[in-house]
Amino acid sequence: MALQKGDFILLDYVAKVKETGEVFDTTIEEVAKKERLYKEGEIYEPKLVVIGEGWVLKALDESLTNMEIGKTKTVEIPPEKAFGARDPEKVRRVPLRHLTAKGITPTLGMRLEYDGKMATVRAIGAGRVLLDFNPPLAGKTLVYEVTVKKKLETPEEKIAALIHRRIPTVEADKFKFTIKAKNVSIEMPQEAFYLEGIQVAKRGIALDIQKFFPEITAVKFTETFKAEPKAKA
């Protein structure tokens, strides 16, 4: 069955730079470890994508309707549809002392902030540093190896995935929720009570649910603080 705009899918991918074969992003933990991309605390799992919502690069998003569930497909994205061409005007030499004064010891390939913009260190010479303000992947052709793992069908599956997208550090099945008429009630697990940015995440979940389920007019979150069992004397 063909996928279409608005479908909720779970996607695994390995993203490479065509010119070098270097992997720069993946949803798969073992690939991240093998390619030395692995970050402690990062969540590696299939990514929720609603087709047509721009949650992945536009050229990749547009190719998803041609995919079949469970089959790996390769999508090649030229620079103009990815991060644009490299602009030589965005490369500047700056005095090394400007960086050391901020406590930065530049190394080749390092990403740093300078004048409020992110740059990559391309060369270090006599008292000067060559900074490249182009996006790291500008001018590169990207190759995505993509597998649609699953299509989410029921409102329950979709809402669970929307919650998990905003609060990925807490296991999805710890959130209990009910859908009644025009209301969704979400019982927050204790692990989520004090997470940084939790109010912003809750607002995002409510907006997401109302966007994709226009019939829902209210999203309610409850936090229940249970009394600690008293120790017997």
Image (cartoon, rainbow, N blue to C red):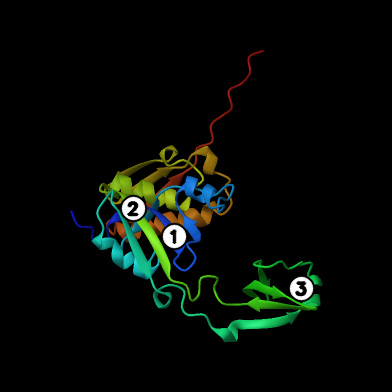
In front: 222, or 63?
A: 63
Query: Secondary structure beneath disc 1?
Result: strand
Badge 3, how many Cα within 10 Å: few under 14, some, many 20+?
A: some
On the image, the x and y values in percent for residue 172 come to: 42, 42
Tell me where residue 145 sits by quadrant. bottom left
Going by the numbered disc 3, the residue's amino acid type is: Leu
Label 1 vs label 3, nearer the camera: 1
Badge 2, how many Cα within 10 Å: few under 14, some, many 20+?
A: many
CA separation, marks 2 and 1? 12 Å
Query: Is residue 198 rendered to the left or right of residue 211?
Result: right
Q: Is residue 69 visible?
A: yes
On the image, the x and y values in percent for residue 209 come to: 35, 55
CA separation, marks 3 and 2? 43 Å
**Residue under pointer 3:** 99
Going by the numbered disc 2, the residue's amino acid type is: Thr
Residue sitting at x 56%, y 50%: 38
In front: 118, or 19?
A: 19
Going by the numbered disc 1, the residue's amino acid type is: Ala
**Residue under pointer 2:** 147
Q: Which mark is residue 15?
A: 1
Query: Secondary structure beneath disc 3?
Result: helix
Q: Is residue 56 visible?
A: no
On the image, the x and y values in percent for residue 54 come to: 37, 66
Residue sitting at x 65%, y 73%: 122
In front: 41, or 24?
A: 24
Q: Which mark sits nearer the N-terminus, 2 or 1?
A: 1
Query: Is residue 101 rendered to the left or right of residue 195?
Result: right
Q: Are marks 3 and 2 in contact (CB under 8 Å)?
A: no
